[in-house]
Amino acid sequence: MNQIQIKSAARFLIDRRNHRANRDRLAFDLRPMSNDDALAIQKATMELIGDEVGGWKTVLPVGDILNIAPIFSSNVHGASHYPVRFQKNICRIEPEIGFRFKKDLPVRDSAYSDKEIKDSLAGAHMVLELIENRYHGDEEVTYLENLADCLFNQGLYVGPEIPLEKAINSPELDFVLTQGESKIFKGKHPNNGPLLPVLWIANFLREQGVGIKSGQVVTTGSFAGVHEVQAGSVFTIVYVGVGEMKIKF
């Protein structure tokens, strides 16, 4: 894709974020055909959207399949009442652990060591990623189109801080989700623990010419898939042995 196509695709996706009634796909000539195309559209979106990057979502790649996207600051919240867009009164969430950075990891030629990355972390949090499909649900949208559009991310709820070592050493967690009735589910991190995606993304972004900034939160993949909660009603989610959050979307 050339720069005109990349910026046109980014503007289309930004407009669709801001005007939710539009759920159309990108025009055929603006659809990404490679990971590089999709990442270039993400980068153009960051430049054109008029918002700072407040965090990132990621898990380790699977072959050529990347799972990485920016989360914009206006969509990162920590208040117990969180404004969201929802469909049919349903909000979709993924229970995750996120890591907040206390100092920048700017772009440089040499790779960051695991120790440098760990030393740049301010702490860890229970977080919920909010999931939103901005396309029509009956379309066969490609993985690359979703990657360009930030992989279903609507936002990030940042909950209470948890001990860093507890977060790092939690490959499995059980959860209790209560909204009217309680549901218990067992969780297992897709990368056998949430730290590995953080170590990966710091150097992947560096290679893309993008640095991590102090204050940003990297959320590292769902322990237990996607779950649905009712909008407008308080719910509680317990990370067993870690803590709990009480939220109203």
Image (tube, helix red, strand yellow):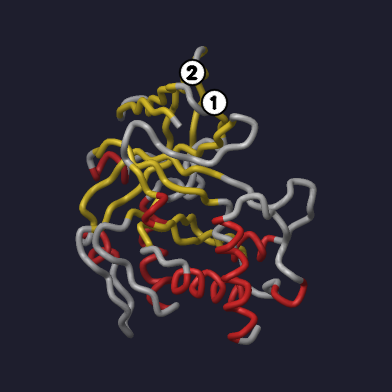
Q: Marks 1 and 2, how far apart in space?
A: 8 Å
Mark 1 residue type:
Gln
Quadrant position of the C terminus in the picture: top left
- Of the 4 image quadrants, the one containing the N terminus is bottom right
- The residue located at (50%, 39%) in the rendering is 94
Seen from the viewer's position, the closer of residues 120 and 216 is 216
The residue singled out by tag 2 in the image is 179
> What is the x, y in percent for residue 118?
25, 59
Residue at horizontal 50 percent and vertical 20 percent from the top = 184
Which residue is labeled 1 in the image? 230
The earlier-in-sequence mark between 1 and 2 is 2
Q: Are marks 1 and 2 in contact (CB under 8 Å)?
A: yes
Residue 203 falls in image quadrant: bottom left
Residue, far top: 181
> In the rendered view, would you say 194 is above or below 83?
below
Image-based side of 55 in relation to 227, left or right: left
In the picture, measured across the screen, residue 35 lies left or right of residue 23, that is: left
Would you place residue 140 above or below residue 84 in this image? below
SS for callout 1: strand
* Location of residue 169 in the rendering, given as x and y in whole percent from the top left corner: 32, 42
In the picture, measured across the screen, residue 22 lies left or right of residue 223, that is: right
Which callout, 1 or 2, points to the residue nearer the camera?
A: 1
Q: Nearer the viewer, residue 31 or 202?
A: 31
